[in-house]
Image: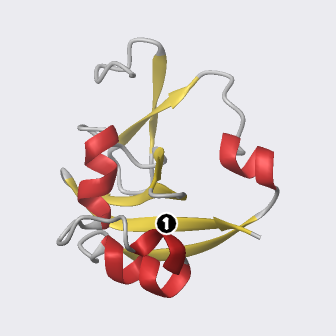
Amino acid sequence: MRATACSSWRRRPNSTGSTNCSAAGRSAASPLQAAQGPALRFVLAGDAALSEVLALYAPAQAAAVPPGLTLEAAIRAARPEPVEGDEVDAFGVRLAVSVMDGRRIAKVALMLAV
């Protein structure tokens, strides 16, 4: 688990003027993408219901999702203090924080291996 103060991470500004933590020397490709090749990327609202999103894009995983779980909540379960660019694996898909609005995750990228 990473430290929220970016101890081993460096701060970098993003397009909205806030800052992100990024691992020094970290590869741009996520481990999921590196292992499975290119991915389709869909950007969705952070408050979208994960079960409904998976019903469209990954139906086999949709049944395992607790009712009412949003994309933002799924990310926060793994990263309590997310920053833009954070990626997590949840229910067989990769979710990435695309846009933060203050402390709220406004946009989430859903990445599916092709």
Say left or right for 72 vs 12: left
Q: Residue at x 72, y 34 (%)?
A: 27
The colour scheme used here is: secondary structure
Going by the picture, which residue comes out furthest to the right? 37
Say left or right for 108 vs 110: left
Q: Residues within 10 Å of mark 1 (few under 14, many from 20)?
A: many
Q: Residue at x 32, y 45 (%)?
A: 18
Q: Residue 71: name its quadrant.
A: bottom left
Q: Residue at x 28, y 77 (%)?
A: 48
Q: Residue at x 33, y 40 (%)?
A: 78
Residue 16 drawn at (x, y percent) = 36, 56
Going by the picture, which residue comes out furthest to the bottom? 56
Name the residue that disc number 1 marks: 109
Note whether 77 is above or below 66 in the view shown: above
Quarter of the image with the C terminus in it: bottom right
Q: Total number of numbered labels?
A: 1
